[in-house]
Amino acid sequence: VTGPGNAFENGKSCTQNLGRIVAHDVVVAAGTDESLEQITANVFIGGTGSGVNAAFVDVYIYEDAGGSPGAEIASELGFIPNSQTVVGTNFGFDVWELVLDITDVALPGDAGSDTTYR
């Protein structure tokens, strides 16, 4: 399952100590089942050239509840990224590509309509 990128827009870094989180919807097409095995995300971390990256990442996967997160179906806390690479800079921050090879999570689709996971 892949999602579209939208370049490096201005925003804030995501850090646990500041209570900032990142969310992304995953849509499973009607009549199909998917497996979430890897997450690749570009995030602002640390000032440009600082070398500061993600010490760990907390991952949560939720069912959809009418456009909001529903019941938690999986989580991995304190996950150390498999790789971290600076892929650009903008707005005074390094942009790091984080790759997380998570434990496989089954994302079953609905026979009649698309299914969203949050």
Image (cartoon, grey):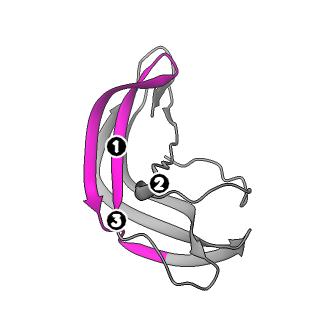
- For label 1, the residue is 60
Q: Quadrant of residue 60?
A: top left
Task: For marks 2 and 3, give the one nearer the viewer.
Answer: 2
- For label 3, the residue is 56
Q: Is residue 80 on the magenta stretch?
A: yes
Question: How busy is the neighbourhood of tag 2: few (under 14 within 10 Å), some, or many (20 plus)?
Answer: few
Secondary element type, mark 3 = loop
Mark positioned earlier in the residue sequence (1 or 2) = 2
Kind of residue indicated by mark 3: Phe
Report, in whole angstroms, how far the alpha carbon at label 2 lies from the one at label 3. Answer: 14 Å
Report, in whole angstroms, how far the alpha carbon at label 1 lies from the one at label 3. Answer: 13 Å
The answer to whether residue 66 is above or below residue 42 is above
Q: Bounds of the magenta span?
A: 57-84
Whether the residues at callouts 1 and 2 have beta carbons within 8 Å, the answer is no
Task: Single out the residue that lies furthest toward the front.
Answer: 18
Report the side of 3 relative to 72 (left or right).
right
Kind of residue indicated by mark 1: Tyr
Question: How busy is the neighbourhood of tag 1: few (under 14 within 10 Å), some, or many (20 plus)?
Answer: few
Secondary element type, mark 2 = helix
Report the side of 118 relative to 4 (left or right).
left
Q: Is residue 98 on the magenta stretch?
A: no
- For label 2, the residue is 18
Report the side of 3 relative to 80 (left or right).
right
Percent x, y for residue 102? 30, 56
